[in-house]
Image (cartoon, helix red, strand yellow):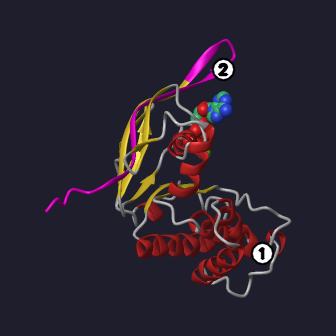
Amino acid sequence: MNKSPLPVLTLKNIWLSYKSGDGQLDVLRGIDFTLNQGELVALVAPSGTGKSTLLHVAGMLESPQKGEVFLSGKNATQLNDYERTQMRLHYVGFVYQFHHLLVEFTAQENVMLPQLTAHVSKKQAAQNAKNWLEKFSLGQRLDHLPGKLSGGEQQRVAIARALANHPHVLLADEPTGNLDQKTSDHVFDLLLQIVRQEGLAALIATHNIELAKKMDRVITIEEGKVVPYNF
Ligand code: ADP
Ligand code: MG
């Protein structure tokens, strides 16, 4: 029996530069990285080293100048806009540092929206959203607008939204970076618990070493490349 782990995300020799004045800023300089099914990896690196850029490339929110992105074995680099949107919708859940919830929609509606885009029926999407929010202890907050929720609650809704379409990989960019220590620990623990329950793979950028240690592996970015983090 083949017991080798299944890669859900593979980055192959990714290069990305930004224009900077007259020159260019080489942010990603040959990123090679594989995330396996069910694996939780923390990305810990100083500000400005390219964490967000790497996550955006992995989530197909940004295209590299060179290199390839594979999601569950499918090459995501050669797709047209429609295919890219579909793949992002079904394969990737993205959580930002700031919740990016739609402020005129309730918590439940926010978790319904990506499902409706994926053509789940309204009734089913509402039920799924309720289930997700209950897992995140937000069963009493379904009808609340984001503005009426605390920072920790907003972020829990944002994570529920990212998981709503059962993605293969969760990408999170400093998901608790905007919260106080106690709330951050709580939200992070809940996130890890649910990601483990669902058997999901996750790549999470964080500045918090203690939180990073709870994950299976910790990586950093050095000179534009992914290397193991040295504690
Ligand atoms: P991190 O998330 O680790 O703080 P980023 O990926 O956001 O780092 O940014 C890496 C570098 O690229 C930084 O120097 C940043 O200023 C620069 N950068 C990020 N996005 C852009 C952009 N759209 N245009 C130009 N430079 C950018
Ligand atoms: Mg960043």
Residue 172's x, y, as percent? Answer: 55, 56
Identify residue type, mark 2: Ser
Number of other residues with Cα within 10 Å of mark 1, as a class: few under 14, some 14 to 19, many 20 or more: some
Q: Which mark is residue 149?
A: 1
Residue 49's x, y, as percent? Answer: 53, 37
The N terminus lies in quadrant: bottom left
Residue 14's x, y, as percent? Answer: 44, 31
Of 18 and 214, the residue lying toward us? 18
Say which quarter of the image contains residue 83: top right
Of 90 and 14, the residue lying toward us? 90
Q: Is residue 87 left or right of residue 116?
A: left
Q: Is mark 2 within 8 Å of ligand 1?
A: yes
Q: Is residue 20 left or right of residue 11?
A: right
Identify residue type, mark 1: Leu
Where in the image, quadrant-wise, is ligand 2 located?
A: top right
> Could you tell me which residue is drawn at 75 percent across and 71 percent down?
109
Segment colored magenta: 1-25
Number of other residues with Cα within 10 Å of mark 2, as a class: few under 14, some 14 to 19, many 20 or more: few
The Cα–Cα distance between marks 1 and 2, rounded to whole angstroms, is 39 Å
